[in-house]
Each structure stands twice: as C-alpha cells, then as structure tokens.
Image: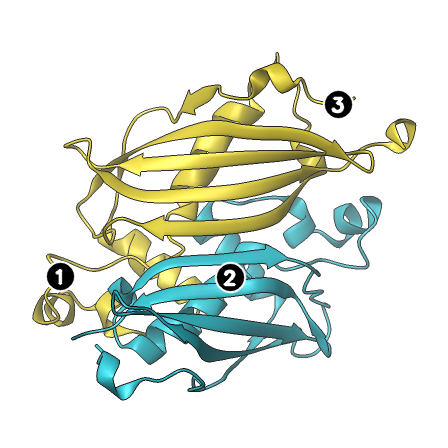
C-alpha cells in the first residue's frame, strides 16, 4: 500500500527535550570503538576549546530515531516500521553537540514517492538548542519495502 | 586540529580496519536506540530476506566519520557528512564477525577553508557505502 503523499509537509516533534549526557557520549563513542579523548575526558575537551565533552558527528541519530518514533506511531500514515530500510543519511552541523546541551527535535516529511513497489520517504530532523538556535539538520531516506501485492 | 595549509587535494587519510562482531552490534543498538532485530536476531533477519544478521548502516557511517575525525584531530571539524547505504555489512556469528575496511581521500579544497573527503567503506571485498563524503573545516 503506497503512503499518502498528503503527508508531505507534515511535522512530528519528538516528545520532550533530550539532555546530552557525558556517559551517553562516552557510550556512543565506545560503540564506535573510538577512544578520542575529546569524547571521554572532560579536561581534554576543555583544553581543545570545548565547553564539555563533544559528541561524535553521528550522535544526532539518537534524536532522529526518537523523532521517527512519532512518525512510525501515526496510525493515519500507516508506516510499517518493520519494512523500513535506511537508504541514505546526512548530517549538517550548525554547531557541535556537547554534553549538557538540552536539545529539541522535530521531524519533517519532505517527500514521499513510490519506486519499484517501494515507498521512498524523505525525512528531515531539525535539532535546536534551548534558545531555539539550530544545532543539526539530519536528513534520512527511509525505504519502505513493498509486499508482494505491490509489485 | 589539523591545519588547512598542511592539506591538499589528493591527500590520503590513514586507513581504518574494524572487526564487527555480534557483540559490537548489540552495543551499538543500545548506544543509538536502534533495536531493529535484523541487527541481532538471525531468525528475523532471514525472515525478511537477509542472508544473516547485518550491521546498522549508522554503525558503518559512524566508523566512516571516525576515520575523518581522527585524521582532522577534532570531531568539531566534521561540519557535514553524508552517505548512501548501498550494501549491507553481513555479520556472521562465527569467528571475528565482519571486517570493515575504511579509507578516505581529500578530493576538493574550498575557498571557505573547508575540504571535502571522499570515504570508501568495504566489507567482504565489496563497497558498502555510496557517495560517502565529509566536509571538514580545518584550522587556520
């Protein structure tokens, strides 16, 4: 079943804000096998000019996934998340993310098209700080694989 | 942070080789919040037509940006990054899991002081990322 293109332009704010914790940064960096002291050692991060630990460049996916849960939970859209494959991903950092940041995320549906029985959903997660200033723009292409009846 | 005068188009980044086992996938699932069972449950992976458990695309992208931020000397230098997930990294239960090999090359120098790095990620002899790039703002 093709997704309704009327959903293009809709937005889904993530529930609540997200506080970036030092241990979460350390955990995320460790999951990438990355021992860069700027992710783990507050003094090293400060010596490099950062206010606290800096988050890895792909850390913002955590906020994007949280916002995508709102999209997946919209019964009107009817997205079958078990059929979703990640097609592409990009991040534009307006400033680095640091421990202590209190971030908000809103997911925007920028495009829906059907190709070869698959729905291609283009979403954009806009991440802002407490002052409402832009922090990161994360764009994802979600490919919803069609069932046999769609081919 | 790496300074821009020391960098020119054609420079190659120190390569990175990472063995991904099932344990690394579980660890990444917890760290990222992506608990899709195709990344840790072989039965579910096969049910949806995959050959075996596969790594999170975002884990491979994270390794690709690790290559770049390590080279740049500060993760803040990576101001943008972009990839296409073209092939899955299949992670068998046996042995060392899957080997992911990453390399990068400076392809463009821009007037604003940034450089573009093109990244190659391979597993089992095939590229797994397409159009993988990072924009890096080097120190002046």
- Residue on which disc 3 sits: A2
What is the quadrant of residue B74 in the picture? bottom left
Task: Note whether A10 is above or below A54 in the view shown.
Answer: above
At 69% from the left edge and 22% from the top edge, which residue is drawn? A3
Q: Nearer the viewer, mark 3 or mark 1?
A: 3
Q: Give neighbour class at mark 1: few <14, some 14-19, many 20+ (Cα, 10 Å).
A: some
In the rendered image, the quadrant that contains the N terminus of chain B is bottom left
- Find chain A in the image and tell me its colour: yellow
On the image, the x and y values in percent for residue B91 come to 69, 66
Instruction: Tell me, yes or no, whether the two marked residues, 1 and 2, touch with CB atoms within 8 Å.
Output: no
Residue to which mark 1 is pinned: A50
Residue sitting at x 27%, y 66%: B77
Task: Check disc 2 and report the residue beneath it.
Answer: B61
Indicate the position of residue A102 as horizontal and vertical percent values: 21, 38
Q: Secondary structure at mark 2?
A: helix
Residue at the top extreme of this rendering: A76
Q: Which residue is painted at 60% across and 14% down in the image? A: A6
The answer to which of marks 3 and 1 sits earlier in the sequence is 3
Mark 3 chain:
A
Whether label 3 touches label 1, CB < 8 Å: no
Residue B90 horizontal/vertical position (percent): 71, 65
Residue A94's x, y, as percent?
A: 26, 48
Chain letter of disc 2? B
Q: Which chain is cyan?
A: B
Q: Is residue B138 above or below residue B57?
A: below
Q: Is residue B52 left or right of residue B71?
A: right
Q: Are marks 2 and 3 on the same chain?
A: no
SS class, disc 1: loop
Alpha carbons under labels 2 and 3: distance apart? 29 Å
Question: How are the residues colored?
Answer: by chain
Looking at the rendered image, the disc whose residue lies closer to the viewer, 2 or 3, is 3
């Amino acid at each position: 079943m093709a997704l309704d293109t009327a959903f293009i332009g809709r937005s889904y704010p993530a529930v609540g804000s997200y506080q970036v914790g030092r241990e979460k940064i350390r955990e995320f960096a460790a999951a990438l096998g990355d021992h860069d002291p700027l992710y783990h050692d507050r003094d090293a991060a400060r010596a490099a000019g950062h206010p606290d630990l800096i988050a890895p460049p792909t850390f913002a996916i955590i906020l994007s996934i949280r916002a995508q849960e709102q999209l997946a939970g919209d019964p009107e859209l009817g997205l079958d998340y078990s059929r979703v494959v990640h097609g592409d991903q990009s991040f534009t950092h307006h400033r680095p993310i640091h421990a202590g940041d209190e971030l908000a995320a809103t997911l925007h549906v920028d495009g829906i098209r059907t190709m070869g029985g698959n729905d291609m959903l283009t979403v954009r997660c806009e991440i802002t700080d407490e002052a409402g200033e832009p922090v990161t723009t994360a764009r994802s292409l979600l490919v919803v694989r069609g069932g046999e009846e769609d081919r | 942070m790496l300074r821009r005068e020391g960098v020119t188009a054609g420079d190659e980044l120190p390569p990175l080789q990472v063995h991904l086992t099932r344990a690394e996938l579980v660890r990444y699932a917890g760290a990222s919040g992506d608990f899709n069972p195709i990344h840790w449950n072989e039965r579910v992976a096969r049910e949806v037509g995959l050959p075996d458990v596969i790594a999170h695309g975002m884990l491979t992208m994270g390794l690709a940006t690790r290559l770049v931020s390590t080279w740049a000397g500060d993760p803040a230098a990576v101001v943008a990054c972009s990839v296409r997930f073209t092939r899955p990294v299949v992670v068998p239960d046996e042995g060392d899991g899957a080997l992911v090999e990453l390399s990068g090359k400076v392809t463009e120098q821009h007037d604003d002081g940034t450089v573009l790095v093109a990244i190659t990620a391979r597993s089992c002899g095939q590229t797994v990322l397409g159009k993988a790039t990072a924009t890096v703002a080097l120190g002046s």
